[in-house]
Image (cartoon, rainbow, N blue to C red):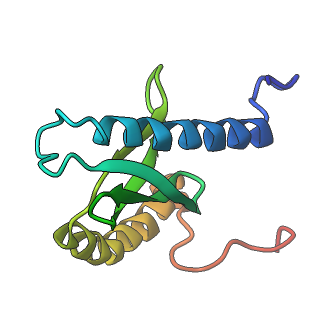
Amino acid sequence: MIQQDGYEDDEELTRKRARDLHAEAYRVARIMSDPDRPKNYAKEIFTVESIAPLSEFTAVVIYFKNPSEKRAAAFFYYYNVGKNPRWMNFFPTDSHIIGMATFGPYKRRLENENYYMNWPPEERPGNKPPPINGE
């Protein structure tokens, strides 16, 4: 829903994103359950066991696989770019998880550095909080 100020209602957007995540999780289950899918040697059937939001734009979906009775975890992330924002996913390996855990400190450092780029060089506050009440 578009508000008078031209911005979309965040609550409605969050609801839509949740519904889209739910639909995408089940769509992935159907795709992965295709007996003719490459690498589906055991002809496994994937069913959604649980959907756990991790943040506003990420979630983990746990799938139960028959007949092996194994479980699989897919990482879902909301791709909010262009005219077709959508949920995307992949099944991360241990290497992906270790890589992303290692990525965190780099991302935090850059976000901290980039924060100060919001001011012209002559007005940058340095590493101190802005004044309170114009002090």
Is residue 5 rendered to the left or right of residue 21?
right
- Image quarter for residue 68? bottom left
Residue shown at 72% from the left, 41% from the top: 15
Quadrant of the rendering where the C terminus is positioned: bottom right
Residue shown at 49% from the left, 30% from the top: 85
Q: Position of residue 26 (x, y in %)?
A: 48, 40
Is residue 9 rendered to the left or right of residue 65?
right
- Image quarter for residue 36? top left
Considering only vertical position in the picture, is 39 above or below 101?
Answer: above
Is residue 96 or residue 49 the one in the foreground?
49
Is residue 131 or residue 94 the one in the foreground?
94
Considering only vertical position in the picture, is 112 above or below 57?
Answer: below
Q: Position of residue 111 (x, y in %)?
A: 43, 65
In this view of the protein, can residue 79 be seen by the observer? no
Q: Position of residue 7 (x, y in %)?
A: 75, 29
Q: Position of residue 45 (x, y in %)?
A: 33, 47
Quadrant of the rendering where the N terminus is positioned: top right
Given the current orientation, which residue lies at the most extreme front position? 67
In this view of the protein, can residue 103 be seen by the observer? yes
Is residue 16 rendered to the left or right of residue 24?
right
Residue shown at 39% from the left, 40% from the top: 28
